[in-house]
Amino acid sequence: MGRVGLGVAAGCAAVTCAIAAALVARRASARARWRRAVALLREFEEGCATPPARLRQVVDAMVVEMHAGLASDGGSKLKMLLTFVDALPTGNEEGIYYAIDLGGTNFRVLRVEVGARSMIISRKVENQPIPEELTKGTMEELFNFVALTLKNFVEREDGKDERRALGFTFSFPVRQTSVSSGSLIRWTKGFSIEDAVGKDVAQCLNEALARSGLDVRVTALVNDTVGTLALGHYHDEDTVAAVIIGAGTNACYIERTDAIIKCQGLLTNSGGMVVNMEWGNFWSSHLPRTPYDISLDDETQNRNDQGFEKMISGIYLGEVARLVLHRMALESDVFGDAADNLSTPFTLSTPLLAAIREDDSQDLSEVRRILHHHLKMPDVPLKTRRLVVKVCDIVTRRAARLAAAGIVGILKKLGRDGSGVASTGRMRGQPKRTVVAIEGGLYQGYPVFREYLDEALVEILGEEVAQTVTLRVTEDGSGIGAALLAAVHSSNRQQGSI
């Protein structure tokens, strides 16, 4: 072989070596990037850990905050608002009652006919969008529109000029002054009617109803959580609390009036009253907060508020997962050039998170479809799709287990958690049968979330006590529950029980 041939051979060998070295370097870089993604996943999983011992700490912290909120206004992150609902449906209510459910840019009017033995004979509902100009006009204009809608509905359904009781679910912050009155604290959800703040919303609605010529009056002003408790108690008198876990979250329960220290001398016929916890604002150092939760809090309008809600409710779970995936994309390059598609807040909704977590196909085809069509991330490899599923699982599991701890906190405050001494210091025997009414899309429509929550209840309470606790799904507490409370608190009925 001549010198030229040797040179060519040497050159080819050098090129081959260079190519090989480049491939080795590329593979090493890919492995390093993957290891970084896995490290971020493990770090996030450790930060979200909710072992039983930690959940019990959250339970105890919840009880402490409940006591503080009952002792004084402003004494706790939990507002522990009085509802003045001192009687709940028993199942013996009879007659026709109406309800208005106003909590957003649509509202509903309902006609509910009930018979003895917890029988709902009929339920008719009409949905009505609110014109945008009425959300920024005057209180009189808004409630005139609501009253006219109800009048047309009543005349169409009954056609009789007979006085009816009305339950009014008003899902905006209200300072309740009686079971049928309360003043608006502030608007949310896009409403900005300035002349309404500080006014009694039930009185404003009653005045509008009178102007319309309709003989219907508000006998119960409630929020959706209290309505859920009423509906649960209507079907089962062992119902002592209600929890909503959907887009948002809240809880209420039946408290002894002598335990409501901030209202000394408060008297009720039943000796008890429903307390609206506003538990979305609960906070404790025992909650497993991660840097992603801090980032989420920073990008919301209610920074440093609703900390518990931001960990367990449907508005936020998808966003927590997106923040984790976005950091993985930036620091590990596992999503390739599609990282920018994860940079927009709230592009990964909680329904999408649930669909990703519940994809049990071998090749995770639904995950691939969601990443491609909703997040514009095509050709994500299977092992990366598995990583995405795991992130969604961690977020779901933490949320469900913390929600379970919140529920047990209520049970412990009531002395129904099976521990030796109630939070009041009184001794007690075997735990009573306890029912918690529960409503909301996360628990009802997301089986994995429900399984994790139920599992955590058993871990915290123990098998024996957990068997005495029933989570009963209700539907439409904000509508039917409000109508039932109207029945209980109408002037022509005897009081229900609590």
Image (spheres, rainbow, N blue to C red):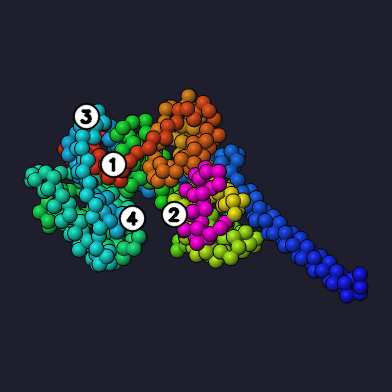
Q: Earlier in the sequence, mark 4 or mark 3?
A: 3
Residue depicted at 40% across the width and 41% down the height: 444
* Residue occupied by mark 4: 172
| Residue 181 lies within the magenta run | no
| 316 lies left or right of 477 | right
- The residue that appears at 50% across and 65% down in the rendered structure is 344
Disc 2 element: loop
- Across and down, in percent, residue 103 comes to 31, 54
Dot 2 alpha-carbon crowd within 10 angstroms: few under 14, some 14 to 19, many 20 or more: some
* Mark 3 element type: loop
Q: Amino acid at mark 3?
A: Ala
Considering depth in this image, is 183 or 294 the residue closer to the camera? Answer: 294
Point out the tag, 1 or 3, that comes first from the N-terminus. Answer: 3
Q: Position of residue 454 (x, y in %)?
A: 49, 36
Of residue 265 and residue 189, the one placed in the foreground of this image is 189
Marks 1 and 3 sit apart, C-alpha to C-alpha, by: 16 Å
What residue is shown with label 3? 116
Q: Which residue is label 1 attached to?
A: 481
Characterize the local packing of mark 1: few (<14), some (14-19) or many (20 or more) Cα atoms within 10 angstroms: many
Q: Between marks 4 and 2, how big is the CA–CA gap?
A: 17 Å
Residue at the outermost top position: 430
Tell me how far mark 1 sits from mark 4, CA to CA: 17 Å
Q: Amino acid at mark 4?
A: Phe
Residue at disc 1, secondary structure: helix
Mark 2 and mark 1 lie on one chain; the one further toward the N terminus is: 2
Q: Nearer the viewer, mark 4 or mark 2?
A: 2
- Return the x and y of residue 279 as percentages of the image width and height: 44, 48
In three-dimensional space, the C-alpha distance between marks 2 and 1, rounded to whole angstroms, equals: 24 Å
Q: Position of residue 229 (x, y in %)?
A: 34, 39
Sequence-wise, the earlier of marks 4 and 2 is 4
Q: Quadrant of the C terminus?
A: top left
